[in-house]
Amino acid sequence: MTHPEDSTGVIDLGDEADTPHDISQLKSPIYLPQRILQAIGAAMLVFLAIFITIAVLLRYTGNGIIGAVEIAAMLMVVTTVLVIPAATAADENFRVEVADFFLKEKGLRILDILSLVVQLLVALFLAAAAIDLLLHDIATRTTMGGELEWPRWLLSLPVAAGFLGIVYSTLIVIFKFRSNRVERHIYPEA
């Protein structure tokens, strides 16, 4: 509906969304290690889109690419794992904001600290597990199932790198929080 006093006929769809749709809209800086992982993930995403298009067209004509499903699945996992550290470092909004209504500033600060500690512990646990899996895959020369029988460390290496990136990104957020540079709002004040 248009507002009766609005002569332009523009439909008001309400305000902007409360949360950004991608990490480029977050206002915290993304440091070089996260940018490198994010760029690799973005390049892989472009390659994945082209690869899937070619594989589908070849399949339509009665041909195919050996290992297309295996390659596409691996690229999707790796792309996801490589972009997560940049999103982790850029977003300070780790706790559920329902608590804002019930707690004062000191209580919210305690919740922020608790959530950062829990996030760091989980990230450390996942990174240790991913590194252990990588070392196991290298030692046992395990292969992935499928037509190509690639060594599984080709997948566990980027997963371990991604989880180490999450630990690094979490530490950046903790240091920003410690120096009181973390602000409460995602968007800059207008």
Image (cartoon, rainbow, N blue to C red):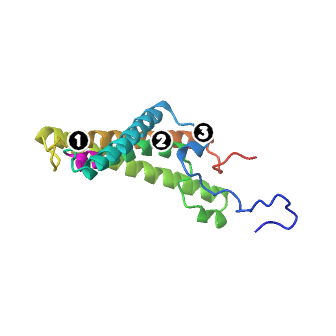
Q: Nearer the viewer, residue 129 or 41?
A: 41
For the point 54% across and 45% down, which residue is it? Answer: 23
For the point 37% across and 42% down, which residue is it? Answer: 50
Circle number at residue 179: 3
Q: Which mark is first along the chain, 3 or 1?
A: 1
Q: Which residue lies under the disc numbered 2?
A: 86
Q: Is residue 97 magenta?
A: no
For the point 55% across and 61% down, which residue is it? Answer: 96
Q: Position of residue 175 (x, y in %)?
A: 53, 39
Q: Residue furthest right?
A: 5
Circle number at residue 26: none
Q: CA distance from mark 2 to mark 3?
A: 20 Å
Crowding near the residue tagged with mark 3, few <14, some 14–19, many ≥20 C-alpha atoms within 10 Å: few
- Disc 2, SS: helix
Q: Nearer the viewer, residue 31 or 13?
A: 13
> Residue 148 is drawn in which quadrant?
top left
Crowding near the residue tagged with mark 1, few <14, some 14–19, many ≥20 C-alpha atoms within 10 Å: many
- Disc 1, SS: helix
Q: Main secondary structure of the magenta part?
A: helix
Circle number at residue 134: 1
Can residue 163 be seen in this snapshot?
Answer: no
